[in-house]
Image (tube, rainbow, N blue to C red):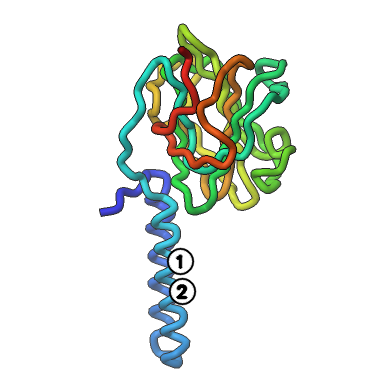
Amino acid sequence: MVKIHKEGKKFLTVLLIVLVIINTSMFLTEQSLFILISTISVFTFLFFLQFFRDPNIKKTLDDNKIVSPANGKVVFIGEAEEGEYFKKKKLQISIFMSPFDVHINRHPISGEIKYYKYHKGKYLVAWHPKSSTKNERTTTVIENNKIKLLVRQIAGLVARRIINYSKVGSKVDQASQLGFIKFGSRADVFLPLDFKPSIKVGQKTVAGVTELGSLD
């Protein structure tokens, strides 16, 4: 049984009703056209069903480890200027989420939410270098007694809504849900420059499971 994320239940219900109405209205048309529309409807619903899936995961819970905030592929690891909160160079790890990845975002560490802000913006393709400062995005800063890091959710070309559950001052648990991005998008993590990542560009990640590196 596929578990559906709460952010998708309303959308899927409306989509199902619309598809049923369309197919019912096409029932008395030419059989070949009805079969075509029905087939397209089934594949459309199945696509969105898998997009909003909420699979069970075996969370990585370790205060000495940083875990991935997103499912997807690592597209960048390197120094970058973080100009919103830290206002200095940090180690940036960027993870691209395709429409076929699970789009639940998770907290890389346990700690306290020190800063949160939502930014309106454009919808450049998520791997575009300027998408981190030009696109619709959120910025969340989490701190514990070992590290302070920043997670940025970035909307992509077809991502039109970012969900973020952060509240400044609240305590969060590692690998718990930070938010959800609807359709293709990207997540960036900004870490200290001396952080030694254990992942590589091109590697696939699983939110709340894949270790980005250790604080040891």
> Splitting the image into 4 quarters, where does residue 116 fall?
top right
Q: Relative to 140, does residue 43 appear above or below in the rendering?
A: below
- Residue at 70% across, 25% down: 80
> Splitting the image into 4 quarters, where does residue 38 fall?
bottom left
Q: Is residue 91 left or right of residue 57?
A: right
User: How far from the left and from the top, in percent, is residue 137?
Assistant: 62, 35
User: How far from the left and from the top, in percent, is residue 203?
Assistant: 52, 40
- Number of numbered markers: 2
Task: Residue at the far bottom: name it.
Answer: 30
User: How far from the left and from the top, in percent, is residue 113?
Assistant: 49, 17
- Residue at the spot of label 2: 40
Mark 2: secondary structure: helix
Q: CA distance from mark 1 to mark 2?
A: 6 Å
Tag 2: Cα neighbours inside 10 Å, few (<14), some, or many (≥20)?
Answer: few
Q: Is residue 195 left or right of residue 49?
A: right
Label 1–label 2 contact, CB within 8 A: yes
- Residue at 61% across, 52% down: 158
Q: Quadrant of the N terminus?
A: bottom left
Q: Label for residue 123?
A: none
User: How far from the left and from the top, in percent, is residue 178?
Assistant: 45, 30
Q: Relative to 9, does residue 119 appear above or below in the rendering?
A: above
- Residue at 56% across, 38% down: 74
Q: Amino acid at mark 2?
A: Ile
- Residue at 47% across, 87% down: 33
Q: Relative to 30, does residue 138 appear above or below in the rendering?
A: above
Mark 1: secondary structure: helix
Tag 1: Cα neighbours inside 10 Å, few (<14), some, or many (≥20)?
Answer: some
- Residue at the spot of label 1: 44
Q: Is residue 124 left or right of residue 178?
A: right
Q: Amino acid at mark 1?
A: Thr
> Splitting the image into 4 quarters, where does residue 88 fall?
top right
